[in-house]
Image (cartoon, helix red, strand yellow):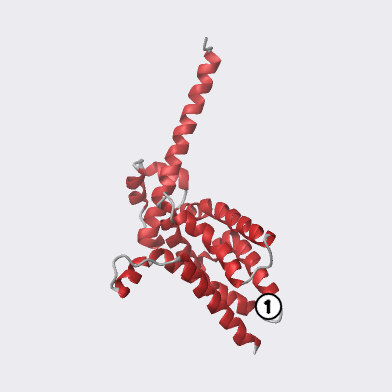
Amino acid sequence: MMTKKTTEKQRLRAPSKRSLASRSRILDAAETVFARDGFEGAKVRDIAALAEVPLGLVNHHGGSKEALFREVVERRAEELARLRLEALAQAKGQGALDLTAILGCFFRPYLAKAAGSDPQWLAYARLVAMVSADPAWADISTDLFDPTAQRFMDEICALHPKVGRAVVAEGFVYSVAALLAFLTSEWRIAALASQSDAQASVEGLVAFCAAGCAARIAQAET
C-alpha cells in the first residue's frame, strides 16, 4: 500500500527527472547552436526553440550566455580527459612510447566518440576549435584542456629532453589543429580527390602529425 509520505516523495522526484531531461535538451541544443553560429551569433531564443523549452527555462538552467557556453564545453571535457589518460596509461603498460603512440592516445579516444552514434560529439569539435583559437576563452582552455595536454607533452619532452618545451608545445598545438580539421573537413578530401568515397584515415592523421612534430623537434635539435 502506498502511503501519503511515499506519494509525496514520488511527486518530489518527478520534477527533478523532468528538470534533468530539460537541462540535457538545453545543453544539446546549445552545443548545436554554438557550433553552427559561433558564440556571438548564437541566440538564446534559437537554443530554446531547438530544445523545445520556454525561453525562460534556458536562462534558468544556463544563466548567462557565456556561462551556458562554458557549461556546454565543460560537460564533455572530463570524460574526454579520462579516456585519453586511460589510453596513455594502457599504452605505457605495453612498453616504451614514441611520438606516434603518444599522439594516437590523444587522438583516438575523441575520434572514437565522434564516429559513434552521438552526433553531438562532432558539434563539440567545433566548440573546442573556437575555444582554442580565441584568447578570450583562455580560462576555459587553462581549466579544462591544459592539464591533459601538459601530461601528453610531458611524455614527448621525456623522449626529447634536450628540446625546449616551447618547441614541443608548437608541434602539439599544430597537431590538435589537424585533429579538429580531420573531424570537420572530410568532405574537402573527397572534393579535392575527385572521389566521392574518399575518406580521411585516423592512421594518416596520426602519421602526419607525428612526422610533423618529429621534423620540428629535429630542427630544434640541430
What residue is rendered at 47% in x and 65% in y? 202
Residue 86 in which image quadrant: bottom right
Question: Which of 46/101 is in front?
Answer: 101
Judge whether 120 appears above or below 24 on screen.
below
- The answer to which quarter of the image holds residue 213 is bottom right
Residue 88: tell me if it is visible: yes
Q: Dot 1, crowdedness within 10 Å: few (<14), some or many (≥20)?
A: some
Q: Amino acid at mark 1?
A: His
- Could you tell me residue 47's position as x and y percent? 36, 49
Secondary structure of the residue carrying numbered label 1: loop
Q: Which residue is mark 1?
A: 160
Is 121 displayed left or right of 170 in the figure? left
Residue at horizontal 51%, vertical 27%? Answer: 13
Judging depth in this view, the residue of 119 and 123 nearest the camera is 119
Q: In the picture provided, is 130 more to the left or to the right than 153?
A: left
Relative to 177, residue 14 above or below: above
Q: Position of residue 160 (x, y in %)?
A: 68, 78
In the picture as drawn, the residue positioned furthest to the top comes out as 1
At 47% across and 32% down in the image, what residue appears?
A: 17
The structure residue drawn at horizontal position 38% and vertical position 54%, both measured from the top left corner, is 32
